[in-house]
Amino acid sequence: MENPKLKPVAVLNLWQYCEEGMVEDEFLESNEERDIRRFKLIYHAFKHSHDDFVPKIDDVVKRRVRHLTVLNQVEVDEALVRLPPSLYSCGTLVDLTLYAVVFDHPEEEVVSLPCLKTMHLEAVKFDGTKILKRLISSCPVLEELVIVTHPGDYLGVVFVRSQSLKSFKLESEREEIFGDQSLDPKVEIDSPSLEYLIVYDYKPKSFSIHSISPSAEVTIDVTFDDDPLKRTRIRNFLRGISTVRELIISARTLKVIKAFSHFEPLPQFSNLSRLDASFVGSILELLPTFLGCCPNLQSLFMNFKDVDSLLQLIDEFLESNEERDIRRFKLIYDWEAYEHFHDEFVPRIDDVVKRRVRYLTLLNKVEVEEALVRLPLSLYSCGTLVELTLYAVVFDHPEKEVVSLPCLKTMHLEAVKFDGTKIF
């Protein structure tokens, strides 16, 4: 049965300052003795009064609010909204979303958010370099964290230490200017339960992962400045991501790794089973070295427009896993000038099939009839295949007695050509 004290829900869109006092006062007065379960404020006032605004948010917090969103859309620095000190010790808060507000320096003894599970901070200004670290450490059940850093937020370090955190997304709104002023804050992650990490368009002074879940899935788009004397930051970065299970890595991050590999060996990615990477252009030279550091790699996801690079990729992958089964193989190929390579392609896919592949995806995105790729006959009798996805390929007429796919549960066929009326 629902608790009657948790019924009021406020969703306010304030476009004029005169509406702020009227709407908020009316809502709070009409629910004077009741808790507020959810409060969302989209704030676009023409004039901001700190003395009027803070007490109202303080009243909301003290009404045992559970879900609080404050989005300040006034594009003037002076209009950045400051939050009441009571927010730092709200014992009921579960979900907090803030945009373009100010976190003042709190008293250390009052920082406690025991129920907070989700926190989303974007363009938030921290009035002190250690506030974020203290804020995160005060959330013992925090599971999801999103931070979008912003110029002038006074963040020296994005320090994320949490035993409970499972998902962390970090982005940057930095301005591209010359020198250290264009760099993002340092990153320190010490979260042994962290399973999902996404870092997008980030250029930190340093990036270190002290602990992360061994089953973590990491998407990384990080670059560093070009100073060869500062290789320690790249070494620490690589050590941090080398322990994860699944990795999606951008071309510009691989470019940094390629430059580093000319001076020092790469660490072993012994736990890595799935890699989705953009080895494009000259970065392809890094591929043999990188795959050599991934002894337990089972899945490799790539996208190529160049036939020779595609064939080289497949060869490198198969050679680096010569005696191992391949659990999942996904190939997306698309090149502008098609050259027939049936004789080179079919034996390689045949090798993949014979490695007891379970999940096979072949997507041919070339929009010409001659580019339809034919499949090896071994595919028709693959005893381990569980899932098959094909696009713009050719099914040749098989020998009837060899058609057997005993484990296949899912089959997705699109724009597939059947070389015979009864094959399907």
Image (cartoon, rainbow, N blue to C red):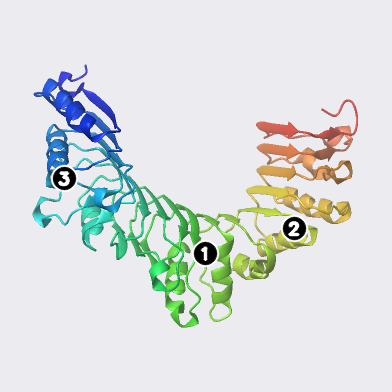
Residue at image location 60% in from the left, 67% down from the top: 290
Q: Determine the image quadrant of residue 392.
A: top right
- Mark 2 or 3, nearer chain start: 3
- Residue 50 has which mark? 3
Dots 1, 3 in contact, CB < 8 A: no
In the visual, does 369 lie left or right of 93? right
Q: Determine the image quadrant of residue 97.
A: top left
Residue bearing the label numbered 2: 310
Residue 244's place in the image compared with 101, above or below, is: below
User: At which x and y percent is residue 227?
Assistant: 48, 79
Q: Determine the image quadrant of residue 86.
A: top left
Considering depth in this image, is 284 or 311 the residue closer to the camera?
284
Residue at image location 21% in from the left, 32% down from the top: 18
Secondary structure of the residue carrying numbered label 3: helix
Q: Amino acid at mark 1?
A: Phe
Which quarter shows the N terminus? Answer: top left
Residue at mark 1 to residue at mark 3: CA–CA distance: 52 Å
Residue 405's place in the image compared with 80, above or below, is: above
Residue at image location 82% in from the left, 44% down from the top: 375
Secondary structure of the residue carrying numbered label 2: helix
Secondary structure of the residue carrying numbered label 1: loop
Dots 2, 3 in contact, CB < 8 A: no
Q: Residues within 10 Å of mark 1 (few under 14, many from 20)?
A: many
Q: Is residue 43 visible?
A: yes
Residue at mark 2 to residue at mark 3: CA–CA distance: 60 Å
Q: Amino acid at mark 3?
A: His
Label 1 or label 3, whichever lies nearer to me, is 3
Residue bearing the label numbered 1: 269
- Mark 1 or 3, nearer chain start: 3
